[in-house]
């Protein structure tokens, strides 16, 4: 199995370039710590800066999926830069991942049509 289950590299919608960050959800805290220690301070090949690693304030696969889905709001099916989501070694679609990994209670109050909640005004 992969050491991570979620990778999101947000892109600017205006210039279609990376915003300079990536969100990776590791399935094991020790692996996450080791990767962060190995990468932090390394030279970035684009832009000449140094890589800065830090723990995100949102932790866990379902929390990351729900956060990104809420941010995408009603454009969830046509996201400009959807995340890569893995179920073991198999890549799965963002919407399928939400349906599979998000807690049912979160989906019932979800503000996006098709996830059990009312449509957004």
Image (cartoon, helix red, strand yellow):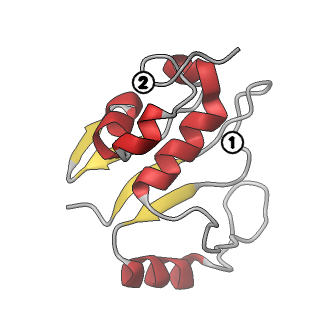
Q: Is residue 30 above or below residue 52?
A: below
First-in-chain label (1 vs 2): 1
**Is disc 2 placed on a helix, strand or loop?**
loop
Q: Residues within 10 Å of mark 2 (few under 14, many from 20)?
A: some
Say which quarter of the image contains residue 46: bottom right
Q: Nearer the viewer, mark 1 or mark 2?
A: 2
Q: Position of residue 68 (x, y in %)?
A: 57, 41
**Mark on residue 4?**
none
Q: Is residue 27 above or below residue 20?
A: below
**Total numbered labels placed on residues in the image:** 2
Q: Residue at x 60, y 19 (%)?
A: 75
Say which quarter of the image contains residue 39: bottom right
Q: Residue at x 34, y 75 (%)?
A: 28
Q: Residue at x 40, y 33 (%)?
A: 94
Quarter of the image that includes the N terminus = bottom left
Q: Is residue 81 left or right of residue 85?
A: right
Q: Position of residue 16 (x, y in %)?
A: 70, 28
Q: Residue at x 42, y 18 (%)?
A: 114
Q: CA distance from mark 1 to mark 2?
A: 32 Å
Residue on which the image places disc 2: 116
Q: Residues within 10 Å of mark 1 (few under 14, many from 20)?
A: few
Q: Nearer the viewer, residue 96 or 23?
A: 96
Residue on which the image places disc 1: 18
Q: Is residue 22 left or right of residue 116?
A: right
């Amino acid at each position: 199995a992969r050491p991570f289950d979620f990778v999101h590299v947000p892109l600017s919608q205006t210039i279609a370039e990376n915003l300079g960050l990536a969100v990776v959800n590791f399935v094991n805290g020790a692996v996450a710590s080791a990767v962060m220690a190995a990468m932090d301070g390394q030279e970035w090949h684009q832009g000449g800066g140094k890589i800065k690693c830090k723990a995100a304030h949102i932790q866990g696969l379902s929390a990351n999926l729900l956060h990104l889905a809420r941010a995408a709001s009603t454009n969830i099916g046509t996201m400009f830069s959807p995340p890569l989501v893995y179920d073991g070694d198999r890549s799965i679609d963002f919407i399928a991942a939400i349906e599979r990994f998000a807690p049912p209670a979160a989906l019932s109050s979800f503000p996006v049509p098709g996830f059990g909640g009312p449509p957004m005004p």
